[in-house]
Image (tube, helix red, strand yellow):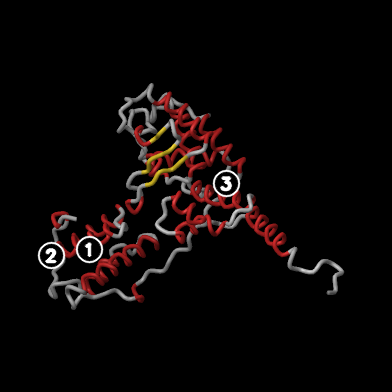
């Protein structure tokens, strides 16, 4: 990364650290944004010791004291990692200890949709008005319907689906090209026959309302441009409310939960097919675009159906090992 992206007194150190993040495929957009913010913070403060001292480190962490716990933890860990890197060049650098680590907010478990709930969301998407004062688009309902179907059947991140271009969607082979996604990883994602048919049908409608530029977004809005994540999430919240999936205070399932839903469903099908689930977890991890198998485990919430399948398999396994009823041998 060029030093020019940083302008503070530690610009060269920030650039070198950012380069290590990119080399290890951990330089996502949020991390680099926070790193530039820390660089600007050092530029606004005097560095009498020539490096980050305890006062500056605590002031940086205090700047987000009102933010969510997970946001404060992310800032803490980024600063701690950078300070460790900086300490190899400037021995007087203060490295934040565990006493400064913000407490973790308990992770919200994903909502595992039933088949009927997914059907209700798809039906609700098709029932949307295509023409509204805020969003005039002749294919609005079909766009959201196809997008939800794709997320539910492929486990894509919403950002990955919205970044798809016409060139990224191979409608002949049924393969999606996911380019430079989270952690700068790219991969090929095959889709099911039913999902492919839905993508083909949507494509025929889409090219009628927006230019067929290969670099153009596959999912388009009324302006002929791609959707923002915030816009799709807002429409999805409305759909879940209409489907009765939200509490009176507005709490309810998230769009990202469709990714967890896909992972759990895939596990359940492997159990039912008698597959070695642990041996197949790396395949699921690769398909989802995770850096390692442990990342995939975040999405694997145990469901009643999954427990029943595991129990059935265990009893089938143990049947030949345990003595039959009445056998005293």
Q: Residue at x 55, y 57 (%)?
A: 301
Q: Residue at x 41, y 69 (%)?
A: 103
Q: Earlier in the sequence, mark 1 or mark 3?
A: 1
Q: Earlier in the sequence, mark 2 or mark 1?
A: 2
Tag in front: 1 or 3: 1
- Residue denoted by label 2: 9
- Residue denoted by label 3: 113
Q: Residue at x 23, y 75 (%)?
A: 94
User: What x and y, as percent, mark residue 58?
Assistant: 27, 71
Q: Is residue 49 above or below residue 114?
A: below
Distance between the Cα atoms at labels 1 and 3?
A: 41 Å
User: What x and y, as percent, mark residue 274?
Assistant: 63, 53
Which quarter of the image is occupied by the C terminus? Answer: bottom right
User: What x and y, as percent, mark residue 150?
Assistant: 48, 38
Which quarter of the image is occupied by the N terminus? Answer: bottom left
- Residue denoted by label 1: 17
Q: Residue at x 12, y 74 (%)?
A: 48
Q: Is residue 306 above or below residue 212?
A: below
Q: Is residue 11 above or below residue 86?
A: above
**Residue 50 relative to residue 28: left or right:** left
Distance between the Cα atoms at labels 2 and 1?
A: 14 Å
Tag on residue 196?
none
Q: Earlier in the sequence, mark 3 or mark 2?
A: 2
Q: Is the C-beta separation of discs 1 and 3 under 8 Å?
A: no
Q: Is the C-beta separation of discs 3 and 2 under 8 Å?
A: no
SS at circle 1: helix
User: What x and y, as percent, mark residue 84?
Assistant: 26, 72
């Amino acid at each position: 990364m060029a030093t020019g992206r940083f302008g503070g007194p530690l610009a060269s150190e920030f650039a070198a650290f950012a380069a290590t993040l990119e080399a290890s495929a951990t330089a996502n957009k949020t991390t680099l944004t926070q790193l530039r913010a820390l660089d600007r913070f050092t530029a606004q403060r005097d560095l009498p010791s020539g490096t980050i001292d305890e006062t500056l480190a605590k002031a940086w962490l205090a700047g987000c004291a009102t933010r969510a716990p997970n946001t404060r933890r992310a800032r803490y860990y980024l600063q701690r990692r950078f300070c460790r890197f900086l300490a190899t060049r400037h021995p007087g650098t203060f490295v934040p200890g565990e006493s400064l680590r913000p407490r973790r907010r308990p992770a919200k478990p994903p909502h595992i949709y039933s088949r009927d709930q997914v059907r209700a969301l798809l039906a609700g998407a098709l029932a949307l008005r295509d023409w509204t004062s805020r969003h005039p688009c002749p294919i609005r309902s079909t766009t959201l319907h196809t997008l939800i179907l794709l997320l539910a059947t492929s486990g894509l991140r919403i950002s990955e689906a919205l970044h798809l271009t016409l060139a990224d969607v191979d409608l002949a082979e049924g393969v999606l090209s996911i380019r430079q996604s989270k952690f700068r990883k790219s991969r090929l994602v095959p889709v099911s026959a039913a999902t492919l048919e839905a993508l083909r049908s949507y494509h025929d409608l889409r090219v009628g309302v927006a230019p067929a530029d290969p670099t153009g977004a596959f999912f388009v809005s009324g302006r002929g441009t791609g959707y923002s994540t915030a816009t799709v999430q807002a429409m999805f919240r409305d759909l879940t409310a209409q489907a009765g999936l939200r509490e009176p205070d507005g709490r309810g399932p998230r769009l990202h939960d469709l990714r967890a839903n896909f992972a759990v469903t895939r596990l359940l099908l492997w159990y039912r097919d008698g597959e070695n689930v642990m041996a197949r977890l790396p395949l699921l991890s690769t398909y989802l675009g995770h850096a390692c198998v442990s990342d995939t485990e975040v999405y694997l919430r145990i469901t009643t159906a999954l427990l029943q399948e595991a129990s059935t398999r265990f009893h089938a396994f143990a049947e030949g090992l345990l003595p039959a009823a009445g056998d005293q041998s």
